[in-house]
Image (tube, helix red, strand yellow):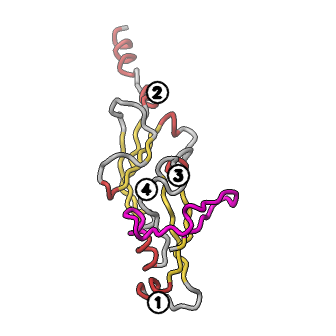
Amino acid sequence: ILFHLVGDGKTTNSAAIGRNITQEPRLGDAADRAAASGLPPLGQPVRGVEEDVGSRFLLLQPVYRTDAPLDNPEQRRQALRGFVYAPFLASGLLSGLTPSQGRSLDISLYDAADGAGSAVYSTRLALAAPWFSVQRRIQLYGQTWIVNWQSTPEFEKAEQSHGPFFVLFGGLL
């Protein structure tokens, strides 16, 4: 199955062109869903599609013969010529979401298919358990993700209240 790079136009990825992704466990399912539905799914995180720069996701857009009917999944599979893909680095997708993200908030992203295994991406450096944490499952491009937002030690320090000490001190006067 022909694979083409969608990107900034300055780089080429000759190693990926011609790659048969249907034979790869982490991409084959996404490729099959894309071929059958005509919709671009986001594949499970992979490494080594280009240079090894960390986890990346591939958004796959199926390309069909122009003269073929595409009324049902079987017709779409028969008409499939290949895929156009856009790679997204996990760090690029989630970094810089908000100006205070690095100071107040840590974000971790997990592939729900892998359960609560290791994070695909995480900004969490602190070893201590966070005071505040929110976890959500989200559906995005045919994939289920677990997103975990946690307070940073810097945020927790800023949120410490000395109110009880002032009340005590005021009561003693």
Tag in front: 3 or 2 = 3
State the image coordinates of residue 10 (x, y, percent, origin top left): 70, 57
Q: Which of marks 1 and 3 is nearer the N terminus?
A: 1
Q: Mark 4 points at which residue?
A: 45
Q: How crowded is mark 1: few (under 14 residues within 10 Å), some or many (20 or more)?
A: few
Quadrant where the C terminus is found in the figure? top left
Residue 172, compared with residue 54, is above or below; it is above
Amino acid type shown at disc 1: Asp
Residue 124 falls in image quadrant = top left
Toward the left, the furthest residue is 115
Q: Nearer the viewer, residue 22 or 122?
A: 22
Residue at point 49%, 50% (across, down): 90
Q: What stretch is highlighted in magenta?
A: 3-30
Q: What element carries label 2?
A: helix
Q: Earlier in the sequence, mark 2 or mark 1?
A: 1
Residue 134, compared with residue 172, is above or below; it is below
Residue at point 51%, 57% (across, down): 49
Q: In this view, does 91 lie to the left or right of 122?
A: right
Q: Mark 1 points at which residue?
A: 71
Q: In this view, does 55 lie to the left or right of 7?
A: left
Q: Name the residue under label 2.
A: 158
Toward the right, the furthest residue is 10
Residue 21 falls in image quadrant = bottom left
Q: Does the magenta stretch include residue 23?
A: yes
Amino acid type shown at disc 3: Leu
Q: Which of marks 4 and 2 is nearer the N terminus?
A: 4
Q: Is mark 1 on a helix, strand or loop?
A: loop
Q: Which of marks 3 and 2 is nearer the N terminus?
A: 3
Q: Earlier in the sequence, mark 3 or mark 4?
A: 4
Residue at point 55%, 49% (across, down): 92
Q: How far apart are labels 4 and 1 at the CA level?
A: 30 Å
| Disc ID at residue 89 | 3
